[in-house]
């Protein structure tokens, strides 16, 4: 009987959330690494950006989203937002019985494995930088590592505007990143889920000597391990015609869908608006 219940659980979706479209870079990686899994994504497009908001506000928003995802009967949750991982993950871990994972720890781990000179840069929102969470995790793994953080708030709007490879984005990247080049970092964490979408611009400005770390890759890998640990990794493909990937937003479903289709191979046929304040 218990085995039957366990088996059913594997078929439940994974809940993934972000303040907007950025978390889709994590979804893309989950689709690639564990293609049997179903996903329910929530993008808080009505309240984006989270990056300049207080810990209390981001935690309140994250709790509402977790309640919504639980209503969707997810089996695990991925906080695909660095700001929410930095500010709210600890509280969410204490409050929910579901396996839950953020993007910061996996990103820190990859950076420590990547650096050769021990100088690691982190670009992220103001909130993530202010929390110093990357520094804490990195120095837990390597206490001699030097971590230099830089908030790059305009990157989020540039990505949401679709200016991924644009002279304006390059100009702003040069201003934000010149200090990190001067320090001589050899590894740079893209510490905001929006930033992998401007990876080529950031790479052009930083130069070929600097390795760029996208925490999404390691997050999807650790998610797979977490599902295995809890015996809820799905082993079979969902039946043809089932809605394997479902997308919800708090505003602007049409724009979200258009954006999602510009970065996925998979066609996002619909995104549904919900009132997240109800949760
Ligand atoms: N995607 C969010 C993150 O990873 C940043 C966008 C925002 O400021 O809401 O931190």
Image: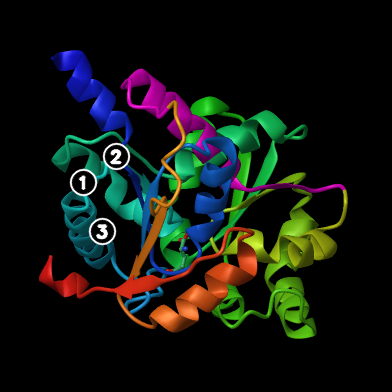
Relative image position of residue 36 (x, y in whole percent): 48, 37
Seen at 17% across and 40% down, the residue is 96
Picture quadrant where residue 128 is located: bottom left
Q: Which circle marks residue 12 in the picture?
A: 2
Q: Which circle marks residue 62 in the picture?
A: 3
Q: Are marks 2 and 1 in contact (CB under 8 Å)?
A: yes
Which numbered disc, 2 or 1, marks the residue that appears first in the sequence?
Answer: 2
Tell whether circle 2 marks a residue whose Cβ is less than 8 angstroms from ligand 1.
no
Residue 210 on the magenta segment:
yes
Which numbered disc, 3 or 1, marks the residue that appears first in the sequence?
Answer: 3
> Which image quadrant: the C terminus?
bottom left
One can see residue 137 in this view: yes
Which colouring convention does the figure follow?
rainbow
> Which image quadrant: the N terminus?
top left
As drawn, 56 above or below 157: above
Label 2, label 3: how many angstroms apart (C-alpha)? 21 Å
Residue picked out by circle 1: 73
As drawn, 188 above or below 36: below
Residue 39 on the magenta segment:
no
* Magenta region, residue range: 209-234
Relative image position of residue 221 (x, y in whole percent): 53, 32
Which numbered disc, 2 or 3, marks the residue that appears first in the sequence?
Answer: 2
Seen at 23% across and 36% down, the residue is 98
* Dot 1: element: loop
Closer to the camera in the image, 156 or 78: 78
Relative image position of residue 144 (x, y in whole percent): 61, 30
One can see residue 145 in this view: no
Closer to the camera in the image, 179 or 204: 204
Q: Residues within 10 Å of mark 1 (few under 14, many from 20)?
A: some
């Amino acid at each position: 009987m218990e085995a039957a219940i366990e088996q059913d659980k594997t078929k439940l979706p994974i809940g993934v959330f972000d303040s907007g479209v950025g978390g889709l870079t994590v979804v893309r990686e989950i689709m690639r690494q564990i293609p049997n899994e179903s996903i329910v994504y929530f993008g808080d497009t009505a309240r984006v950006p989270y990056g300049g908001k207080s810990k209390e506000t981001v935690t309140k928003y994250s709790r509402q989203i977790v309640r919504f995802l639980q209503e969707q009967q997810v089996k695990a949750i991925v906080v695909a937002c660095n700001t929410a991982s930095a500010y709210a993950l600890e509280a969410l871990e204490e409050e929910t019985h579901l396996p839950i994972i953020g993007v910061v720890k996996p990103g820190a781990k990859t950076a420590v494995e990547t650096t050769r000179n021990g100088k690691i840069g982190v670009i992220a929102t103001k909130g993530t930088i202010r929390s110093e969470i990357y520094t804490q995790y990195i120095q837990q793994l390597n206490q001699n590592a030097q971590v230099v953080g830089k908030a790059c708030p305009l990157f989020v709007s540039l990505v949401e505007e679709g200016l991924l490879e644009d002279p304006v984005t390059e100009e702003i990247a040069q201003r934000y990143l010149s200090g990190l080049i001067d320090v001589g970092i050899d590894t740079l964490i893209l510490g905001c889920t929006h930033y992998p979408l401007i990876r080529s611009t950031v790479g052009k400005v930083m130069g070929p000597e600097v390795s760029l770390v996208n925490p999404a890759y390691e997050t999807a890998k650790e998610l797979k391990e977490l599902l295995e640990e809890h015996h809820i990794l799905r082993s079979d493909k969902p039946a043809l015609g089932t809605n394997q990937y479902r997308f919800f937003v708090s505003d602007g479903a049409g724009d979200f869908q258009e954006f999602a289709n510009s970065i996925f191979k998979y066609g996002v046929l619909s995104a549904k608006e919900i009132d997240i304040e109800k949760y």
